[in-house]
Image (cartoon, rainbow, N blue to C red):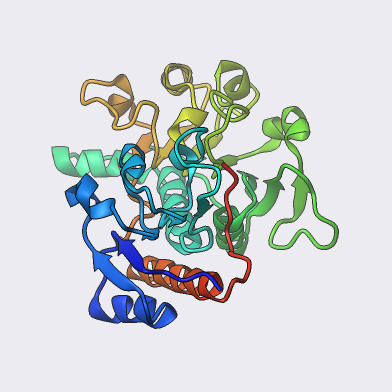
């Protein structure tokens, strides 16, 4: 039976959160410290890390056996050489579906109703109007990445009357619920021209980086909205700006950008039909997200000390 001698957590944990982690590993010494305050000395003698420590610091943890990320994304930690092969890596997939999907859905609805334009008018003291708007009712929505977050987004949009198609690497047998249809990436050229919204929750990978380029955007309807709540490097930003400015794309709802942070002088900031938030859809802004993360971490700690398979295992 594996034992945890020392567990380091970088969670913004309340006493009840730490108590839940402690109950999962009663014999462990738990250290709770913000990730930005960690020093190499803090990592020595640590068996398990719960949280997202700077990858470069992990070399200072010679006793490390397992990293439980508090994020859904694991890209920087899964890169070869970041962790020794025998160190386990797990993430918090399943914690962020509600927060990220709601955030992106509201951004899409705001663009459909041209609310950013009216907000600009409000600030300028202009009483005007911006013409016709669109609706989620009857809209065709394509979700790239039909996992936890993508499925939450699909449920949200279907509840509003949209028809939702999901894209997965492979299509499981059985019902596609909560999607009306499921496809693979091979079907994108046939699907894109019919979609009113294309929303991505894809992780960063060699296959996804730069996927949304001029060719991709040219296949979309001129009135369509692109939404990105996955990784900014999905999009070739110069191509996106050109499509938005030239009117060959209806709008963009972006919680992630390329580059990130988006420089203050970047032209994307000034595009009226782009709605941008600074990668805040997840994190801890919705309190239930932190509760979800703590529960996933505690569950995995219980599995670990019982020598049971961990959930959300990431290959590296």
Vertical placement of residue 203 versus 258, above or below: below
| Residue 31 place in picture, x, y as percent | 25, 66
Is there any visible trace of residue 240 in the rendered image?
yes
Q: Indicate the quadrant containing the C terminus: top left, top right, bottom left or bottom right.
A: top right
Residue at the (37%, 69%) spot, across then down: 5
Image mark count: 0
| Residue 100 place in picture, x, y as percent | 44, 55
Front-lying residue, 268 or 273: 268
> Which quarter of the figure has residue 48?
bottom left
Viewed as shown, does residue 56 lie left or right of 298?
A: left
Viewed as shown, does residue 278 lie left or right of 200?
A: left
Front-lying residue, 284 or 119: 284
Residue at the (48%, 47%) spot, across then down: 73
Residue at the (37%, 75%) spot, across then down: 21
Front-lying residue, 105 or 291: 291
Is there any visible trace of residue 127 in the rendered image?
no
| Residue 157 place in picture, x, y as percent | 57, 57
Front-lying residue, 171 or 189: 171
Q: Indicate the quadrant containing the N terminus: top left, top right, bottom left or bottom right.
A: bottom right
Viewed as shown, does residue 245 lie left or right of 1?
A: left
| Residue 275 place in picture, x, y as percent | 36, 38
> Which quarter of the figure has residue 20?
bottom left
């Amino acid at each position: 039976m594996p034992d945890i001698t020392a567990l380091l957590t970088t969670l913004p944990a309340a006493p009840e959160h730490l108590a839940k982690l402690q109950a999962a590993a009663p014999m462990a010494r738990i250290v709770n410290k913000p990730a930005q305050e960690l020093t190499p000395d803090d990592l020595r003698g640590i068996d398990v890390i719960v949280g997202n420590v700077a990858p470069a610091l992990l070399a200072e943890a010679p006793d490390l056996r397992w990293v439980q990320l508090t994020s859904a994304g694991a890209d920087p930690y899964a890169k070869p050489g970041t962790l020794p092969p025998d160190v386990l890596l797990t993430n918090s997939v399943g914690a962020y579906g509600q927060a990220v999907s709601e955030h992106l859905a509201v951004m899409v609805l705001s663009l459909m109703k041209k609310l950013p334009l009216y907000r600009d008018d409000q600030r300028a003291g202009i009483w005007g109007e911006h013409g016709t708007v669109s609706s989620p009712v009857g809209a065709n929505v394509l979700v790239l990445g039909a996992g936890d977050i993508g499925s939450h987004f699909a449920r949200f949009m279907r509840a509003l009357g949209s028809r939702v198609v999901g894209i997965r690497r492979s299509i499981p047998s059985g019902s596609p619920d909560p999607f009306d249809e499921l496809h693979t990436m091979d079907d994108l050229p046939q699907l894109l021209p019919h979609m009113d919204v294309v929303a991505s929750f894809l992780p960063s990978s060699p296959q996804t980086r730069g996927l949304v380029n001029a060719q991709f955007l040219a296949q979309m309807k001129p009135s369509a909205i692109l939404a990105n709540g996955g990784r900014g490097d999905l999009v070739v930003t110069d191509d996106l700006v050109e499509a938005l400015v030239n009117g060959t794309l209806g709008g963009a709802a972006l919680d992630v950008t390329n580059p990130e942070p988006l420089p203050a002088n970047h032209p994307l900031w000034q595009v009226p039909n782009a709605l941008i938030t600074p990668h805040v859809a997840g994190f801890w802004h919705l309190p239930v997200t932190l509760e979800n993360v703590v529960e996933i971490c505690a569950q995995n700690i219980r599995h670990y000390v019982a020598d049971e398979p961990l959930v959300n295992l990431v290959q590296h």
